[in-house]
Image (cartoon, grey):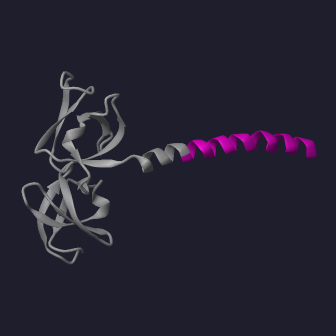
Amino acid sequence: MKNQKRKIHGSVKPLLVVSMFLFVVFSAGDVLAEKLTVNADVANIRSGPGTNYEVLWQVEKYTPLQILDTDKTGTWYYIKDFEGSIGWISKNLMSKIDAVITKPREERVNIRSGPGTDYDVIFKAIKGVPFKVLERKGNWIHLQHADGDKGWIHKILVW
């Protein structure tokens, strides 16, 4: 009986080590991937790294995108958006601007006049509206849309 326990324990240990290694590697990938922000009024997300590739969709100013890779020339980023969609964007359309995009649990999110639920709702935003971050205060983010509208949102409502 003692030998059987050793065999079972011995075969489980390598599986645990491999599982833990894979968890750390795949978790680190998301943590280490840099987010950059669209700096143009409108930018095309393409199927490949070049203007000759199909436009898959467009994004607006202040849209944050996760950088997954670059092309061989280093002039295009392979990106992922807040919904998990992937594509390519020209590197010159991206900047290191702190930005978020709304990802509400319901149809719309409240944008408030201050950092808390006791402040007035000044406007509402639907899913997928990008904002530049002006300030972070605890769980609240002071933000500004490309059209100039400003307000506060709780951090759980954005990506």
**Residue at position x 18%, y 33% in the image:** 57
Q: Is residue 108 visible?
A: no
Q: Residue furthest top?
A: 52
- Residue 146: image quadrant is bottom left
Residue 137 in the image: x percent, y percent? 29, 72
Q: Residue furthest left?
A: 147
Instruction: Judge by depth and name the residue closer to the eye, 26 or 5.
Output: 26
Residue 61 in the image: x percent, y percent? 15, 48
- Does 120 appear in magenta? no
**Residue at position x 32%, y 49% in the image:** 35
Locate the N terminus and report the quarter of the image it occupies.
top right
Q: What residue span does the magenta drawing correspond to?
A: 1-24
- Residue 18: image quadrant is top right
Secondary structure mostly seen in magenta is helix
Total number of numbered discs in the rendering: 0
Q: Is residue 82 above or below residue 147?
A: above
**Residue at position x 27%, y 27% in the image:** 49
Q: Residue furthest front?
A: 73
Residue 30 in the figure: left or right of residue 63: right
Q: Is residue 76 above or below residue 143?
A: above
Residue 2 in the image: x percent, y percent? 92, 46
